[in-house]
Amino acid sequence: MNLSSTLGRLRLTGIIEGLSFIILLAVAMPLKYLAGKPEMVTIVGMAHGLLFVLYIALTIIAKFQYRWSWKRMLLLWVASVIPFGTFYADYKLLRHEQEKADEVRTLRETRHVRNEEH
């Protein structure tokens, strides 16, 4: 995962956002409602909210940078509100985009090196 690219940052944010959502639903919410301890929801909820906003912002940036369709961007948004959805989206949509972007970058670097040799 290349964190110097928008796509790499989107993928990492999606994974962390997905984990925060699962922790919120599976740990923090039961602690609040079953054990009477709402503190965890406050902490995890704030972190998850920030990660969610960052994920949405990165999908918008990526949509224009990589010339994605509106459908692709909306699919990523829907995936972000479904538990485990960001993991599925990363596997089905973003991983392949990363592979294509890496291939393009490698081709450009190869051409650049060849041009410098001549």
Image: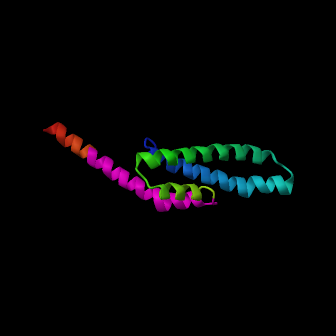
In which image quadrant can residue 43 be found? top right
The residue sitting at 85% across, 54% down in the picture is 35
Q: Is residue 14 left or right of residue 8?
A: right
Rendered location of residue 56, percent (x, y): 56, 47
The residue sitting at 44% across, 46% down in the picture is 64
In which image quadrant can residue 39 be found? top right
Rendered location of residue 114, percent (x, y): 18, 42
Look at the image and tell me whether residue 7 can be seen: no
91 relative to 4, above or below: below
Look at the image and tell me whether residue 64 can be seen: yes
Question: From this viewpoint, which residue is outermost toward the front?
Answer: 70
Rendered location of residue 53, percent (x, y): 61, 44
The quadrant the C terminus occupies is: top left
In which image quadrant can residue 116 be found? top left
Magenta portion: prevailing SS class: helix
The residue sitting at 41% across, 55% down in the picture is 97
Question: From this viewpoint, which residue is outermost toward the left?
Answer: 118
Q: Is residue 104 left or right of residue 11?
A: left
Question: From this viewpoint, which residue is outermost toward the top?
Answer: 116
The residue sitting at 24% across, 46% down in the picture is 110
Rendered location of residue 60, percent (x, y): 50, 47
Q: Would you say residue 47 sits in the magenta stretch?
A: no
Question: Which one is nearer the viewer's eye here, 113 or 65?
Answer: 65
Number of numbered discs visible in the structure rendering: 0
Q: Would you say residue 83 sits in the magenta stretch?
A: yes
Question: Which one is nearer the viewer's eye here, 68 or 103?
Answer: 68
Q: Which residues are magenta?
A: 82-108
